[in-house]
Amino acid sequence: MISANIFLGMIGPWQIAIIVVLVLLLFGGKKIPELMRGLGSGIKEFKDASKEENEEKK
């Protein structure tokens, strides 16, 4: 828990801006929506799989 608080305390608005600029430079503006869509579908699949696992345990 302490390490998470330290990490979140270290990220400020300038660091977030730098990260966003780096992501834009690396992937370009057209690729970012595709990456976010893929990330969202991956998270959805993970949640569905965890729900199925919980139902099987009951």
Image: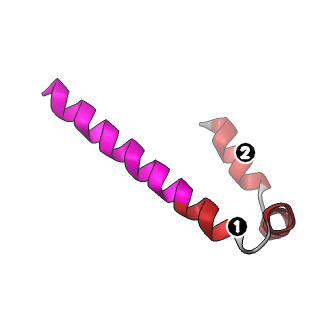
Q: Residues within 10 Å of mark 1 (few under 14, many from 20)?
A: few
The image's mark for residue 20 is none
Percent x, y of residue 23: 80, 62
User: Which quarter of the rendered picture does the C terminus lie within?
Assistant: top left
Mark 2 or mark 1, whichever is nearer to me: 1
Which secondary structure lies at badge 2? helix
For this view, does 50 lie left or right of residue 28? left
- In depth, the one of 15 and 2 nearer the eye is 15
Say which residue appears at 46% left-offset and 55% top-offset.
41
- In depth, the one of 6 and 57 nearer the eye is 57
Furthest-left residue in view?
A: 58
Q: What residue type is labelled 2?
A: Ile
Say which residue appears at 32% left-offset and 37% top-offset.
50
Percent x, y of residue 35: 63, 60
Percent x, y of residue 17: 82, 70
When the figure is inspected, residue 6 is found, relative to residue 41, above or below; the finding is above
For this view, does 52 lie left or right of residue 31? left
Say which residue appears at 31% left-offset and 45% top-offset.
48
| Mark 2 and mark 1: Cα distance apart in space | 32 Å
- Tell me the quarter of the picture where residue 33 sits: bottom right
- Tell me the quarter of the picture where residue 25 sits: bottom right
Part of the protein shown in magenta: 38-58
For this view, does 45 lie left or right of residue 16? left
Which of marks 1 and 2 precedes in the sequence?
A: 2
Which secondary structure lies at badge 1? helix
- In depth, the one of 2 and 55 nearer the eye is 55
Furthest-bottom residue in view?
A: 29
Q: Name the residue carrying label 2.
A: 6
Answer whether residue 44 is magenta in the image: yes
Q: Name the residue carrying label 1.
A: 31
Main SS, magenta region, reads helix
